[in-house]
Structure formats: C-alpha cells, structure tokens
Amino acid sequence: GAGVSQSPSNKVTEKGKDVELRCDPISGHTALYWYRQSLGQGLEFLIYFQGNSAPDKSGLPSDRFSAERTGGSVSTLTIQRTQQEDSAVYLCASSLGQGNSPLHFGNGTRLTVT
Amino acid sequence: QKEVEQNSGPLSVPEGAIASLNCTYSDRGSQSFFWYRQYSGKSPELIMFIYSNGDKEDGRFTAQLNKASQYVSLLIRDSQPSDSATYLCAVPLGGSYIPTFGRGTSLIVHP
C-alpha cells in the first residue's frame, strides 16, 4: 500500500517568506507526527495529532510555526516569516495511534531558507 | 530530564562481524522501544520494536531489552556493508505516545 507522502520534496525560500509543507499519512492511521532534523542532528519533535483530539503542540519552537490536520487525514505545517535557522528536513510520520504503534516516516521535505 | 541516549560513534566493524548498538532511556515506566535505520539523505525506516524484557529476533537483527537497567540494544549479526547507516533508538517517555529519539549511532561496516 501507499506510504506516507510529503510534498514538496525540496523547498527553497527567502528569509521572511511563509511556507507550507504537506503530509498525507497512511490510510487508516489515526496518529500523525511532525519532526524536524537539522544537518547532522537528531529528530526534534514538533507536533502530534491523534484522531479528533486537540494536538500536542509542545514541540513547536516558536509561534511562527503552526499545523493543522483536516478531516483526520492530510496535515499542513506552516512556517511564517521563515528564518535561516528554520532550514532543516521536515519529517512527517503516521501510526495506528495505539500506544505501542511504530511510526512510519515519509521521505521528508528539505527546507532551505536563503 | 526526559532523555534517550546513544553513543554517536562511529562504530566500525568488519564485514561478517556482530555489531552491537546500545541505548539508555530515562523513564523507568516506558513500555515500547523502537529501532530505526537511517541512510544518509534518507528518512528513518523501522527495523524492530520490542515491548517485553528479553530478546526479540528478526533475521539478522536481535533487540534486547532490560527494563530494570533502562537499557535496550540492537545486535546485527553477519554485518554487511549495506548495513552502514545511522541507527536511531526511539522511546515514548513519561506516558506519552510521542517517541523521543536518540541522536543515533553511526555504523560503518567495512569489507
């Protein structure tokens, strides 16, 4: 079956512009996660959606970052007024949403802010 | 402090040897433990998960969990050059459903 799909795969933007990153999870997966990975660094949690519950936004680094998940499926991560330190690979993952369910990752969006 | 700790390496082993990758975690109450492999420039892919104390084997891979010591390891038998990658340990901490990832151990298998 289809895996987690992210778009675009690469995005180059100028400092100060807004960007939107899209994630389409595996069908039937109720949990959706956003992480980011800076060059040579580990995975940094950003936000978690589970079904119709309020999202866990505890990992968002600033109020320039927001995310939504429409209809319990597709999610969009928005970064406003991008800064150079936002440059990273943004990874989306989905899971069955049960406590022990493993995450399945998309191919990521590489964001470069110039 | 909620932490998942891994030695960054690199761990270098000859082809055919056993590679041993280790991970410690801070939350004694954690219930599930995951190992991911990440090739350079690619996204993480699930290798194994383990929930119970002891060993779990899948092909050349064995995960070992010791909850009392808060320690989980991954053994790779008959290591191949294609196993060269960064191995990430992930553990949901503090009763959360959100896995905290270690920084990963770089494994190099040389012919």
Image: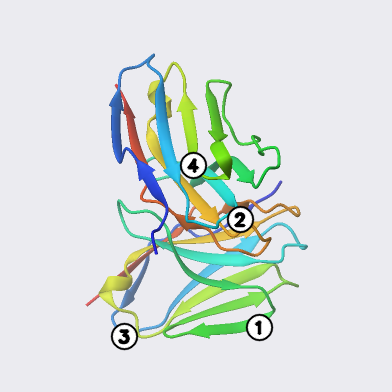
Q: Residue at x 47, y 50 (%)?
A: A25
Q: Which is more toward the observer, B93 or B66? A: B93
Q: Are marks 2 and 1 in contact (CB under 8 Å)?
A: no
Q: Earlier in the sequence, mark 3 or mark 2?
A: 2
Disc 2 with disc 4 on a shared chain: no
Location of residue A56 by image quarter: top right
Q: Chain of mark 4?
A: A
Q: Residue furthest left?
A: B111
Q: Is residue B111 above or below residue B23?
A: below
Neighbor class of circle 4 (other Cα within 10 Å; few <14, some 14-19, many 20+) is: some
Residue occupied by mark 1? B54
Q: Earlier in the sequence, mark 2 or mark 1?
A: 2
Q: Residue A99, image x and y in percent?
A: 68, 60
Of the two numbered discs 2 and 4 in the rendering, the one whose residue sits closer to the viewer: 4
Neighbor class of circle 1 (other Cα within 10 Å; few <14, some 14-19, many 20+) is: few
Residue occupied by mark 3? B16
Q: Secondary structure at mark 2?
A: strand
Q: Chain of mark 3?
A: B
| Mark 2–mark 4 distance (CA, rounded to whole Å) | 30 Å
Q: Secondary structure at mark 1?
A: strand
Q: Secondary structure at mark 4?
A: loop
Q: Which is more toward the observer, B78 or B39? A: B39
| Mark 1–mark 3 distance (CA, rounded to whole Å) | 24 Å
Residue occupied by mark 2? B4
Q: Earlier in the sequence, mark 1 or mark 3?
A: 3
Q: Residue furthest front?
A: A71
Residue A74 is tagged as 4
Q: Are marks 3 and 2 in contact (CB under 8 Å)?
A: no
Three-letter amino acid code of the residue under disc 4: Val
| Mark 2–mark 1 distance (CA, rounded to whole Å) | 19 Å
